Image (cartoon, rainbow, N blue to C red):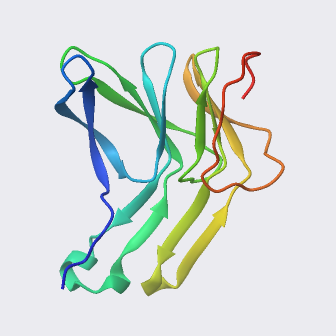
């Protein structure tokens, strides 16, 4: 049987609009999928949260009950470089979240809001899923994440829009 699993990746490719192609891969720690990303005003890219997939036991047993899924509570900051660029991990989101909204802010930071938490560990009886109303602020000086006000209600896959007055 063929198992169709989502792609959990720890690679990124820089797109070159001049030739319509992708460059060499850049690698980072902390494979993820269903993460959010935004370009920041200084040319860096913030990647927030996402889901993890632990296949360690599953690859030994081939039992789907041994799959472990979790939600990441960290971010990655990509800095372009001469060939590959590099990633720095930034800790501090209030909760693990996937499918969150992320918006660049005029001060060079970003707002990370909503999304959902997910943890599935069938063998150990663990199952958590829920939309979140929490929000975090990313700042570049230094690279930090701090909690900010919550939304009025939890939101799955929310969408943000930067308004002319600087609000989101």
- Looking at the image, the residue that sits furthest to the left is 24
Q: Nearer the viewer, residue 21 or 30?
A: 21
Q: Residue at x 72, y 48 (%)?
A: 134
Q: Quadrant location of residue 113?
A: top right
In percent of width and height, residue 149 lies at: 80, 39
Q: Residue at x 31, y 19 (%)?
A: 80
Total marks shown come to 0
Q: Is residue 21 left or right of residue 30?
A: left
Q: Residue at x 65, y 47 (%)?
A: 94
- Looking at the image, the residue that sits furthest to the right is 152
In percent of width and height, residue 24 lies at: 15, 31
Q: Residue at x 42, y 21 (%)?
A: 44
Q: Quadrant of the C terminus?
A: top right
Q: Quadrant of the N terminus?
A: bottom left
Q: Is residue 85 left or right of residue 34?
A: left
In percent of width and height, residue 157 lies at: 60, 52
Answer above or below: position of 142 versus 116. Answer: above
In percent of width and height, residue 60 lies at: 19, 80
Q: Is residue 2 left or right of residue 54?
A: left
Answer above or below: position of 7 versus 158. Answer: below
């Amino acid at each position: 049987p063929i198992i169709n699993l989502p792609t959990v990746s720890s690679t990124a490719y820089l797109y070159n609009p001049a030739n319509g192609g992708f460059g060499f891969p850049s690698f980072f720690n902390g494979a993820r999928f269903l993460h959010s990303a935004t370009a920041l005003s200084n040319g860096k890219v913030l990647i927030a949260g996402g889901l993890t997939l632990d296949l360690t036991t599953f690859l030994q047993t081939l039992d789907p009950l041994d799959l472990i899924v979790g939600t990441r509570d960290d971010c990655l900051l990509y800095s372009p470089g001469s060939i590959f660029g590099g990633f720095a991990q930034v800790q501090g989101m209030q909760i693990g979240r996937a499918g969150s909204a992320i918006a660049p802010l005029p001060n060079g930071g970003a707002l990370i809001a909503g999304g959902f938490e997910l943890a599935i560990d069938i063998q150990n009886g663990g199952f958590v899923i829920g939309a979140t109303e929490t929000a975090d602020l990313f700042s570049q000086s230094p690279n930090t994440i701090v909690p900010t006000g919550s939304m009025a209600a939890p939101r799955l896959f929310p969408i943000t829009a930067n308004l002319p007055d600087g609000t989101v």
